[in-house]
Image (tube, rainbow, N blue to C red):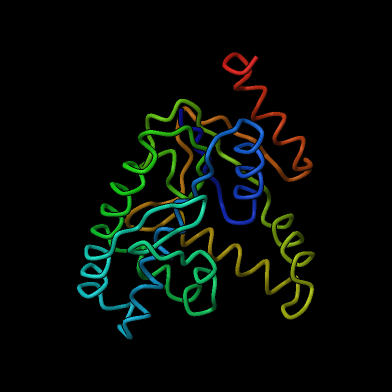
């Protein structure tokens, strides 16, 4: 069974998806980690992440697997390497190539084919798992998401700066050539703005109640 969750950045997708997976005894799969893995592998080769042809070669030549929840490249666990500043800065370039997205989509589907998963990502319900048994679209106002980000990382940027960046990212994500952020017609909409994490989890599990009564 596949439970797929979409939504803009900062609406709680990852945190809630992990909790739901644990609660249901499902496997948690973050599709964005696969693009980060390609980015990391490419940077390790000293190559330019904006060079689409070389990125395509990297994506085609490495084998990405998952072991006990951690992403591995050619059998080596790289989970703790996927959120460094260089990967953060360049992952969007890697994920913007439709050919790379096709490779990653095929890989994710293969890995998920023989397990029960809860997965989240920008185009999880619309492109990667359009036939998921359960689809959810999480949302939250940009103001609330900026407030959450400031609480998580109080040092550095001002609220106004964080809000501007979030709204800019939303605009970019909605207008991407491939994998754009949009709500699947059959996805259950949940506004997480003023709900606790537990309340959102309860809403998700209540929708799935008939299968987990």
Measured as percent of width and height from the top left, residue 18 is found at 62, 45
Q: Quadrant of residue 146?
A: bottom right
Who's the residue at 62% across and 22% down the image?
A: 207
Residue 45 relative to residue 180: left or right: left
Q: Quadrant of residue 201?
A: top right
Residue at image x 47%, y 50%? 122
Identify the residue at image location x=64%, y=36%: 20
Can you say whether 42 is above or below 189 in the image?
below
x then y, percent, for residue 35: 39, 62
205 relative position to 76: left or right: right
Residue 167 in the image: above or below residue 210: below
The quarter holding residue 163 reads bottom right
- Given residues 109 and 49, the one toward you in this image is 109
Residue 92's spot in the image, x, y percent? 42, 68
Q: Position of residue 199 (x, y in %)?
A: 76, 35
Q: How many marks?
A: 0
Camera-side residue: 45 or 127? 45
Q: Quadrant of the C terminus?
A: top right
């Amino acid at each position: 069974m596949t439970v797929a969750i979409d939504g803009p950045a900062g609406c709680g997708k990852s945190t809630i998806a992990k909790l739901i997976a644990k609660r249901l005894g499902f496997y948690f799969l973050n599709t964005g980690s696969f693009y980060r893995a390609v980015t990391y592998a490419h940077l390790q080769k000293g190559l330019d992440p904006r060079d689409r042809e070389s990125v395509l070669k990297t994506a085609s030549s490495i084998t990405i697997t998952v072991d006990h929840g951690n992403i591995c490249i050619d059998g080596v666990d790289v989970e703790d390497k996927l959120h460094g500043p260089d990967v953060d800065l360049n992952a969007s370039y890697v994920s913007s190539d439709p050919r790379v997205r096709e490779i990653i989509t095929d890989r994710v589907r293969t890995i998920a084919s023989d397990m029960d998963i809860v997965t989240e990502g920008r185009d999880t319900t619309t492109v990667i798992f359009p036939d998921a048994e359960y689809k959810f679209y999480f949302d939250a106002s940009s103001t609330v998401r900026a407030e959450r980000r400031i609480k998580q990382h109080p040092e550095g940027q001002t609220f106004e700066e964080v809000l501007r960046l979030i709204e800019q990212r939303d605009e970019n994500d909605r207008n991407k050539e491939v994998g754009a952020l949009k709500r699947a017609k059959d996805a259950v909409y949940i506004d997480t703005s003023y709900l606790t994490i537990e309340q959102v989890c309860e809403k998700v599990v209540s929708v799935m109640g008939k299968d987990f009564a």
